[in-house]
Image (cartoon, grey):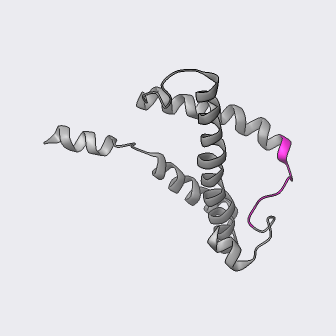
Amino acid sequence: MVIVLHQRDSLEQIGITLKHFVPYMLLSVPLGFLMGLGEYLTIRASYLIPDLTFVNLLKLTITMVFFVGLVEELIFRSILQSRLEQALSVWEALLITSFMFGLMHSGYALFMKFSIQAL
């Protein structure tokens, strides 16, 4: 956000636009669900909320959508990817940001588990 405000970029310049919104949603929602399911089945995460009450689900949804997902996408796709596209090709920028995004989400302390088991 500091970079965007400092450089006074428009929303369109950082990649926030309604162009192709419907096709992206039709692709990203099922793909995001499948990738989330794959991640869950891989790492067997524990519960984020103590029970499935409406209030807890609402809190979790608001946190994940508006704080986690929105900020991650703003940083990686809107800011980083659009900046890299100015210096590189679209495919190079997409590959670099996707690799960085995946690297950020990899592990979830698995490295520490494997390191301790090796000792």
Percent coordinates x, y for residue 64 in the rendering: 60, 41
Residue 102's place in the image compared with 58, above or below, is: below
The question of residue 20 being in magenta is answered with: yes
Residue 28's place in the image compared with 100, above or below, is: above
In the picture, the quarter occupied by the C terminus is top left
In which quarter of the view is residue 24 placed?
top right
How many numbered discs?
A: 0
Q: Give the residues in magenta.
A: 14-22
Residue 65's place in the image compared with 74, above or below, is: above
Q: Is residue 17 left or right of residue 73?
A: right
Q: Is residue 63 left or right of residue 29?
A: left
Q: Is residue 9 left or right of residue 46?
A: right
In which quarter of the view is residue 36 placed?
top right
In front of the other: 88 or 16: 16
In which quarter of the view is residue 117 placed?
top left
* Residue name at image x 70 percent, y 31 percent: 30
Q: Is residue 38 left or right of residue 8?
A: left
Percent coordinates x, y for residue 95 in the rendering: 58, 56
* Residue name at image x 58 percent, y 47 percent: 68
